[in-house]
Amino acid sequence: MAWQALEAHYPKVQELHLRQLFADDPTRGERMTTEAIGIYFDYSKHRITDETLTLLLQLAAESGLRSRIDAMFRGDKINVTEKRAVLHVALRCYLGH
């Protein structure tokens, strides 16, 4: 359902210009950024709207992203091609020390 909603949403945003998006929303540059663990992410400079973000979050929920993230942190075998756990979490722990 969310995937189809995103496909239907695309024609609304495909021709939008960033200048117009910033003109219509002066707080866009502040609202559409986030920072965590020293990484700054600025998605204000992409052709997206609040509706786009809502639809992307809906897609994440419908696709079970949260349970897949939890499985990764538990060490479940989620790498289906190699039939093993992914090591992203271990690598982050190692690099963080």
Image (cartoon, grey):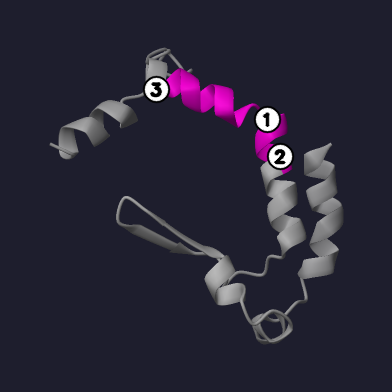
Query: What amino acid is at disc 3?
Result: Phe
Q: Name the residue under label 3.
A: 73
Q: Nearer the viewer, mark 3 or mark 1?
A: 3
Q: In which quarter of the image is residue 1?
A: top right
Q: Which residue is drawn at 78% across and 76% down?
A: 15
Chain-order first, disc 3 or disc 1: 1
Whole-number angstrom distance, CA of label 2 to CA of label 3: 21 Å
Whole-number angstrom distance, CA of label 3 to CA of label 1: 18 Å
CA neighbours of label 2 inside 10 A, class few (<14), some (14 to 19), many (20+): some
> Relative to residue 19, is residue 89 drawn left or right?
left
Q: Main secondary structure of the magenta part?
A: helix
| In-front residue for pair 73/34 | 34
- Asked whether residue 9 is in view, the answer is yes
| In-front residue for pair 28/20 | 28
Residue 77 image offset from top left, x and y in percent? 43, 13
CA neighbours of label 3 inside 10 A, class few (<14), some (14 to 19), many (20+): some
